[in-house]
Every structure is written in structure tokens, then in C-alpha cells.
Amino acid sequence: MPNSITPQATFGGGCFWCLEAVFEQLRGVRQVVSGYCGGHVPDATYDAVCGGGTGHAEVIQVTFDPAEISFADLLDVFFAMHDPTTLNRQGADRGTQYRSAIFCHDDEQQRIAAAKISELNAEKRLSGPIVTQVAQFEVFYAAENYHQGYFRTHPAQGYCQAVISPKVGKFRQQFAGRLRGPARQ
């Protein structure tokens, strides 16, 4: 459970492997867990979520130290690392499980997320209006163990090379000042 010392943020932005690979490299992030959120079926599993009938999104749950990184800073990374203007898809991944979503753990996160979306829409730097779902966090189901740390443990896998590696490279360039310690895979 989140508390004032170790708050959590829950984001969906396409395949959870992509977001996990980026967020685990941020200074101030203590833990990143891939999983499922926002659905109506208890005990979500990968096979059920991929079937599209559970209502869940693939998400990451980030535990972070607000003395080192703010929720607003996490949102900056979140919005930079996926396309929040496409409904229910990221690249070739299509379906509601790949939707852009922020599951807010409290009213403050809800306020900050709404303000960030308004700011980004007003700047008109994106290809269209943001369609990111902003919802109250309810239940998180951790994904199966083989999904955790996927990019770190399978860097040579085709999807990792073609999709995740370029995102990690973009992240490292754009947020170099926010990396924790030595750059990692």
C-alpha cells in the first residue's frame, strides 16, 4: 500500500515491458512491477487480459521516493515515452489492454494528472489531443514472474531489440540527468 514515505504511481502506456525498462532506470524510483489494472475480472492473468475481455490495461506500478522525484516528473517521462494520442493502441499493439492510462492513488495525483494533460494539450506539441484515461486506482494484479524485468533479462529478444531498445535510447538521451547510477540495459 502506498504511504507518505513510499508513494506509488500506476501507468498504462502500451506494452508494460517498454515502460518498465524506462522507469526502472529513473533516479528516485525504488521499484517497478509490471501488471494489470482497471478491469472488472478478479485475479487477472496475461492470457485473460490479452483476450481483451477483462477490461484491464497492461500497466507498471512504480514505487518512488518523492524526495528524489515527484509524481509530476514521473508524468513527464510517462508522456514522453508513449503516444498518449492514440486510443487503445501503441504502435502495432492494439486493444484496450494497451490503452494510455493513469490510475491515480489519491486526489493529489488526480489533480496533477489533469493539470499535466491540460498543459500538454494547450502546448499542442503532440500529434493530437491526449486520450489518456485518468481513473481512480482500485486493484493492481502483478503480472506473471516471466514478465518482470523482461528487457533486462531478454535484451537480445526480437521485440526488445526492435521496440524497447529504441525507447530506452530515447529515454536515456532525453532524461540523462534523471538516470540512476551508471546507465543500464
Image (spheres, rainbow, N blue to C red):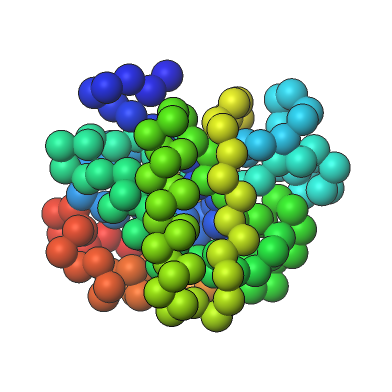
Quadrant, the C terminus: bottom left
Q: Nearer the viewer, residue 152 or 54?
A: 54
Q: Quadrant of residue 157?
A: bottom right
Residue sitting at 62 percent across and 36 percent down? 37
Q: Is residue 111 above or below residue 184?
A: above
Q: Quadrant of residue 116?
A: bottom left
Q: Nearer the viewer, residue 185 or 66?
A: 66
x then y, percent, for residue 155 = 45, 64
Taking 180 as reference, is 134 left or right? right
Residue 156 in view in this figure: no
Q: Nearer the viewer, residue 157 or 5?
A: 5
Q: Nearer the viewer, residue 76 or 14?
A: 76
Residue sitting at 15 percent across and 64 percent down? 177
x then y, percent, for residue 74 = 34, 51
Quadrant, the N terminus: top left
Residue sitting at 60 percent across and 26 percent down? 139
x then y, percent, for residue 103 = 53, 39
x then y, percent, for residue 70 = 25, 44
Taking 184 as reference, is 124 left or right? right
Residue 89 in view in this figure: yes
Residue sitting at 46 percent across and 77 percent down? 124
Number of numbered discs visible in the structure rendering: 0
Taking 177 as reference, is 135 left or right? right
